[in-house]
Amino acid sequence: MEMADRVKRILGNYASDNPGTLTNLARLLNTGTLAGTGKLVILPVDQGFEHGGARSFAPNPPAYDPDYHFQLAIDAGCNAYAAPLGSLEAGAARFAGQIPLILKLNNSDTLAKMDQPISAVTGSVEDALRLGCVAVGYTIYPGSGARNQMYEDLREITLEAKRKGLAVVVWSYPRGAGVSKDGELAIDIVAYGAQIAAQLGAHIIKVKPPKDFVEQPENKKVFEKYQIPTKTLADRVRHVVQASFAGKRIVIFSGGEAKGNDEILAEVKEIAAGGGFGSIMGRNSFQRPRAEAIKLLHDVMDIYKKAS
């Protein structure tokens, strides 16, 4: 009952949504090893589109097969599997009903170098419904000169998704001419990106773990005046969650570039201590041999389970 009540409390933060959307959010929160805890660990595999096959899958060649990722998410006990259209189409029928799916609706590649990044819309809400997804995902780049186009596209996608009973996951990655390279991970910028995603109607917000650095001079004055703690990752995660409607929106944190197990688990402990709702781990799982990936994901889930 305690676990069910926790999920009910989270769903209560989305009172404007219809029963279909709430049901799909509940499916995410009640699936896998972390079912009922209010925490999430999601497997995302959009790197093939974003970085190409070799950079993404050569470290673990079985991962070239889209079916590999469905099975990995299922066997590891993840809450969901997120991927672009082609990857989901390749296995959605074979794995129907076994794992909640999130269709990533926009993607970009690394073949073009852009000062003002914007991802192309590569799927639709109709595609998500056809494939049995519980949610759609969309990336925004606050700081890009093309941000307004992304916000407006996301508004239309969000309106349709909510009308048709799907949840909306927003990858909020500040970058572009308005943000320095170091500033992409600054605590004020990451928290600002999370607030923007919440204001755009996201049910679940995905951000990167922030660094102890304040990018904008105007923000630095505020952080100093009100003594906002930023020294530890737990402090910074706590501020990002606070910026997401005082924790009334689900905020999960990316695993980032490939790194060692000890570093990953230390980071996850800090995220959990700061009140983060979970992790979305791609390269740090599917680039490892299958048994190692499952062990790592189980260890991550154990941390969140103890913190719930």
Image (cartoon, rainbow, N blue to C red):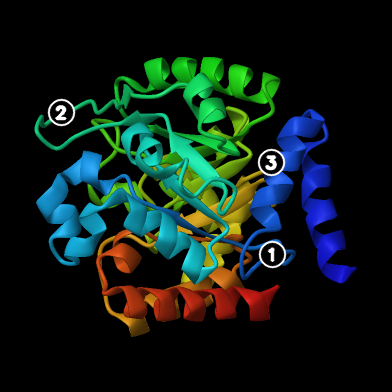
Residue lying farthest right? 1
Q: Who is closer to the viewer here, 118 or 47? A: 47
Using the image, tell me which numbered label, if any, was put on residue 24.
Answer: 3
Instruction: Give the x, y percent position of residue 205.
Output: 54, 44
Residue linked to disc 2: 114
Residue contact at pointers 1 and 3, CB within 8 angstroms: no
Q: Quadrant of the C terminus?
A: bottom right
The residue mark sitting in front, 3 or 2, is: 3
**Type of amino acid under label 1:** Ala
Point 40% across, 24% down: residue = 123
Q: Is residue 55 left or right of residue 278?
A: left
Q: Earlier in the sequence, mark 3 or mark 2?
A: 3
**Type of amino acid under label 3:** Asn
Instruction: Give the x, y percent position of residue 165.
Output: 69, 28
Q: Is residue 119 left or right of residue 93?
A: left
Q: CA distance from mark 3 to mark 2?
A: 36 Å
Residue linked to disc 1: 35
Point 56% across, 37% down: residue = 133
Q: How many marks?
A: 3
Q: CA distance from mark 1 to mark 3?
A: 13 Å
Q: Who is closer to the viewer here, 274 or 36? A: 36
Instruction: Give the x, y percent position of residue 184.
Output: 32, 47
Q: Earlier in the sequence, mark 1 or mark 3?
A: 3
- Whether residue 135 is visible, yes or no, is yes
